[in-house]
Amino acid sequence: MLIDIAHYIALAVPIIPMVIGIVNNRCLDSLDDYFQTSGEDKPEKLISVLIPARNEEQKIGLCIKHILSQDYTNLEILVLDDESIDNTGDIVSSFNDSRVRLIKGQPLPDGWTGKNWACHQLSQNANGEFFVFSDADTTLGKRVLTSALIALKTKKLDLLTLVPRRVTSNISERFMFPFIDWAIFCWLPMKLAYRSQNPQFSATYGQFMLFKRNSYFAIGGHGAVRDANLDDFELGRLIKEKNFKWFLMHGKSQVVTLPYDDNLSAVRGISRSIFPALYYRLSLLLVMSFVLIVIGFIPLFTLVFEIFASDRSITGIAISFLSFVSMAISWGIVCKTFGHNRVLALIFPVSILFMIVIAHHSLVSNVLGLTDWKGRGLTAKRLRF
């Protein structure tokens, strides 16, 4: 009897991400909503666009070109060359525009991760009233800064972050990126996240973080997360923890993350962040893995079993089918919203299994200190239960 109850509960769980996905699809604001007013109320405060760069000669040029094409012109672009051994610094210096400034990174101090130290140095050199942290592998649409500032002003925000569109070039990215969007979009109720000051109800994307300068320094900036492997999430959590106002919007195609170089780079890059997002807790990883296996495979296995069973149950077939469809709907919403291949809505168990493997790889690599950022090793973290 208890086994039957547990089975039916497992079949009912996929309703949760479906409902959250449907609701979020209606209430998640889009930056596009602020485009129509961008010409009517253009703020003229200085914006500092801050980009840490380490061995980014393949992408930094395109990144800067897109920022310089902004319709918001009162900006400075600070790029920190973090001890690159390629032509990153030369490419930045080649831009004949006074708004572009190259900063030579200082040696990494003890207790800091490379990216956080780079971002800290950028903030110390920035003059703007607003800070936009972005990545060298990210391109921005020409109206992003104007529209984002209008949204920040209208909603009285301290941190506005945008969900990027992720460009894929290999099979690993095509399985991982839809899962990442699904894990946030279909499990984080946006209405609750907007209203609650609970730091756990947030998701912050390092590809675009627009801070009020004073709010950034009030929470301690990157110095407060100096040893964190997931600086964007931690900064978003700090904003809420300190009773400042955080907000997440869909960046649509206005914030675009360029693909990794290959499958291995993609796996290592995503693996670096998963276990830190779970606070390095083994219990959370095991619970997450169990839940994903339950909702990803039990509906499908039950459906197949019931169809081919000699004493098949019409009720069992109907329930397991509806359970599978609920999951497929949640994945379909994500694929449509974020521009992923919609075939993933039907083969989502493959993506789930792939990410479970990556998550356990993240556990091992973070605990043993095998992770790195741009070729620089990250400090091993203590495993928590």
Image (cartoon, grey):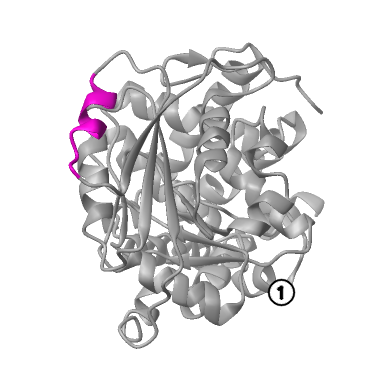
> Residue under circle 1?
195
Residue under the point 36% across and 41% down: 175
Residue under the point 51% across and 45% down: 297
Residue 184 appears at what percent x and percent y? Answer: 54, 55
Image vertical order of residue 302 relative to residue 375, above or below: below
- Callout 1, which amino acid? Arg
| Side (left or right) of 39 relative to 267 | left
Image vertical order of residue 232 relative to residue 44, above or below: above
Across the whole image, how many numbered discs are drawn on residues?
1
Q: Which residues are magenta?
A: 87-96
Q: Between 340 and 311, which is closer to the camera in this rendering? A: 340
Is 56 within the magenta?
Answer: no
Is 92 within the magenta?
Answer: yes
Residue 25 appears at what percent x and percent y? Answer: 46, 74
Quadrant holding the C terminus: top right
**Dot 1, how many residues are within 10 Å of its Cα: few (below 14), some (14-19), or many (20+)?**
few
Residue 284 appears at what percent x and percent y? Answer: 72, 38
Residue under the point 67% across and 27% down: 227
Residue under the point 20% across and 48% down: 65
